[in-house]
Amino acid sequence: MKAISMNARQSLAIGRPIETLEAISPAPAEPDAMVRFAGISKTYPAYRGKPGVNALQDIDFAIPRGSITGVIGRSGAGKSSLVRLINGLEKPTTGRVIVDGRDISALAGRELRLAQRSIGMIFQHFNLLSSRTAADNIALPLEIAGWTKADIKARVAELLALVGIADKHDRYPSELSGGQKQRVGIARALATRPSVLLSDEATSALDPQTTRAILDLLANINRELGVTIVLITHEMSVVRQLAKEVVVLDAGRVVESGDVSDIFTHPKHPITQSFLAEVIGDSLPVSLASRIVSTQPAGGQAVIRIQVRGAGAGDTVVARLARELALDVSLLSARIDEIGGQHVGSLTLGIPVGEDAVTRTLAWLSRYQFSAERLGYVA
Amino acid sequence: MSPELINLIVQATFESLYMVGIAALLGTVFGLPLGVFLATSRKGELFAAPIVNRVLGIVVNATRSTPFIILVVAIIPFTRLVAGTSIGSTAAIVPLTIASTPFIARLVEAAIREVDGGLIETASSFGASPLQIVFKVLIPEALPGLLLALTLAVVSLLGYSAMVGAVGGGGLGDLGIRYGYQRFMPEMMLAVVVVLIALVQIVQSAGDYLARRVNRRLRHR
């Protein structure tokens, strides 16, 4: 994979916009929030015998300027509706969507189209025009915005370099791999220098390695260009790798939102917990699980699982436990991952039965505020 | 075959090409926008106008279900109004255009509907106006299908053009009926059929070639 050449800086000299929304309706400044949902609900009316759907209800949150914010939820949770409210492809039934200080839900026609030029979007299936080369696909939003041919040419070259596919200039989408197609999609979304980039499941059709490369590219774009990124996804791994803020959606409502490390080190809602389980796993290895019995055998070990949450939380627990209680602690299974710089996972320990070892262990763990449970015994 | 007869065939071929060429051109001029509108004017679509869509659909179907030979005769007053006469190749262009317009419109509608709806959403997302979407997305993306549709229309028009001989339209079909059938000259009939087959082959091959040339959906270098 080619290194992203960020020296292809966004040269401000290229392509002064012909007309801007600022010229016709200046935006009131909102310093912190790039996107603010205020009292949003979205109802799709009944149509041709299908009942109406309440896609979104009571949505109130802000997406900080310059952040990478993940919006995670199962299919049908309302993610797609939510992201389409941001760029005005859909209108809320109630409430307002403020993007960069402007109520986009109140705009229509030419004003809306001008506002949409400052909001880029990338798609799961890339949505490239098969009849245009990579370069011409990237040129499309610029043609629509009325840039001159010379400006378009210079800007497209700069964007192809930015996304690391300068050599694919004349390739048609059918000649590109999935990852390359998404790079074209990203370049196209950034063409008009938007302040927000919306990603609608942009990596869901890609293999894990390509996904990682695309997420790295998005992180770079956020860092170098300061573009606010909104990631719509059903994949916890995407949020974990890229987002600093997360909003968990379920059945059209925000069930949790905040800092990724806070939300996922202390998940409250069952949906959040299930997303977390996808990454860290909450099941024991089959060979261990099948040996666990509920009654205490003679000899053998008690199986105790400790939840690990927070920076460095699990580092020394096994060693300290063994030393302070003078026990032959055995490590049966462990799974620790890092989310937003915080350790999240679980350790499954075997504690020798007898001499109150199990009771003492549980007391010791609760003294140091580890959440622990006894799963049973193994011989 | 005598030089006079060969001359007749050449002349009739040019008459047929003239009628079909102009009718196909006019049919496209009227049928393409009509087809694009039919493909984009249902509820929730780009130029949503469900009632107009429904009415136009009925008109298109009515025209298409009228047998061509009846259409030719039925619109003679209109033909005379437009062309100044109801006899001859130029007059025949009027019914040919009226028959090909709804045919082309339906083919265009089908080709445009083949374009992935995600592309319309994509173009909307970066602020394209409905007309920009039509000219920069829908028509270029549907181009292979549109070229095949036009090819089909031209081939059908060649068949229709044989029928306008009934109102003195001239052309190959007229020649085949008058000389080949009524004067019982089987060699004339054969010649007419051979020329028609050759024309259809040439039109179809050219259409296929062009459609392949502009189709970028398939991997090719």
Image (spheres, coloured by chain):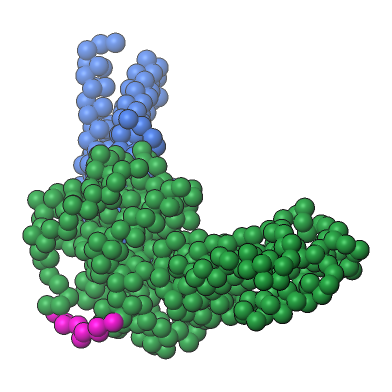
Residue ranking furthest to the top: B1
Residue B190 picture location, percent across and down: 39, 18
Q: Is residue A248 above or below residue B11?
A: below
Identify which residue, A370 or B107, lies in the foreground. Answer: A370
Q: Residue at x 21, y 84 (%)?
A: A29
In the displayed structure image, the side of residue A90 where residue A301 appears, left or right:
right
| Picture quadrant of residue B62 | bottom left
Q: Where residue B88 sits: x, y (%)?
A: 23, 39
The residue shown at (72%, 59%) is A330
> Measured from the top left, where is residue A41 in percent x and y?
46, 84
Q: Position of residue A364 (x, y in %)?
A: 69, 77
Residue at 40% in and 42% down: A177
- Tell me what hue chain A is rendered in: green
Tally the marks: 0
Of A207 and B191, nearer the camera is A207
Q: Is residue A187 visible in this depiction of the protein?
A: yes
The span picked out in magenta is A24-32
